[in-house]
Image (cartoon, grey):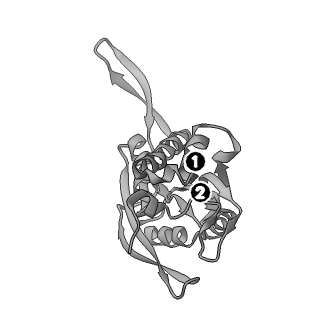
Amino acid sequence: MKVINFANTNSLVSQYMAELRDVNVQKDMLRFRLNLERIGNIMAYEISKTVDYETTEIETPLSTAKCNIISEKIVLATIFRAGIPFHKGFLDFFDHSQNAFVSAYRKYIDKDNFDVFIEYIASPNIDDKTIIIADPMLATGASMELSYQALLTKGNPKHIHVASVIASQQAIDYISEKLPSEKTTIWVGSIDDEINSHSYIVPGLGDAGDLAYGSKE
């Protein structure tokens, strides 16, 4: 399984990541959502280099021009709720793509233990399509695995791109075991070493959903 870690190369992602993590900048929810969206833009551009294209003739006001356009069928999937602004970053670039949405949530057994449940899925058929599953935070990888399994009820994809802003090394290892390595690529802004007893990534950035949309009861 190929893992592309944007932290290994300096780019604008480095700037946006610093602002996402900064407790002072985090107070601006609009800025937080915008930075998730921007990283989605950049990842979408990089992923666009890996998909198949076909050459077609386009009529201009003066003549015709040969242009390369994407020939793959792409489905953009996101995991609610923090994934919404991140998803928009991909949709801004892959604007002709179909979209899928999965609701995955933690149901706590006690203060340190929880199970992940899939409550909702809306997806087109994904048979032989390239699917991009966007979730800003990959802490344990459980939500991503269960969301992927839920999407498989809609077909068998040609290739899977897992896109995340921050992942723990544990989650990277877990996803590498659970998703088909021969057709999965992981794109991540940064890989952090630890998760704490509440399964939050350390140093991470906190609860992305709360920072994007406000705290929940």
Residue at the extreme bottom: 109
Mark 2 is surrounded, within 10 Å at the Cα level, by few (under 14), some (14 to 19) or many (20 or more) other residues, namely many
Mark 1 is surrounded, within 10 Å at the Cα level, by few (under 14), some (14 to 19) or many (20 or more) other residues, namely many
Q: Is residue 29 above or below residue 47?
A: below
Q: Quadrant of residue 155?
A: bottom left
Q: What separation in Å lies between label 2 and label 1 (alpha carbons)?
A: 9 Å
Spot occupied by residue 157 in the image (x, y as percentages of width and height) = 49, 60
Task: Return the residue at label 2.
Answer: 166
Report if residue 75 is visible in the image.
no
- Residue drawn at x 59%, y 76% as measured from the top left: 198
Q: Quadrant of the N terminus?
A: bottom right
For mark 1, give the secondary structure: helix
Is the Cβ of the residue at disc 2 closer than 8 Å to that at disc 1? yes
Spot occupied by residue 36 in the image (x, y as percentages of width and height) = 48, 50
- Residue drawn at x 52%, y 82% as measured from the top left: 115
Q: Quadrant of residue 126?
A: bottom left
**Left or right: 9 in relation to 38:** right
Amino acid carrying label 1: it is Met
Residue at the extreme top: 62
- Residue drawn at x 50%, y 64% as measured from the top left: 207
**Left or right: 146 in relation to 188:** left
Spot occupied by residue 18 in the image (x, y as percentages of width and height) = 59, 47
- Residue drawn at x 42%, y 23% as measured from the top left: 66
Q: Earlier in the sequence, mark 2 or mark 1?
A: 1
For mark 2, give the secondary structure: strand
Foreground residue, 15 or 74? Answer: 15
Task: Return the residue at label 1.
Answer: 17
Amino acid carrying label 2: it is Ile
Report if residue 180 is visible in the image.
yes
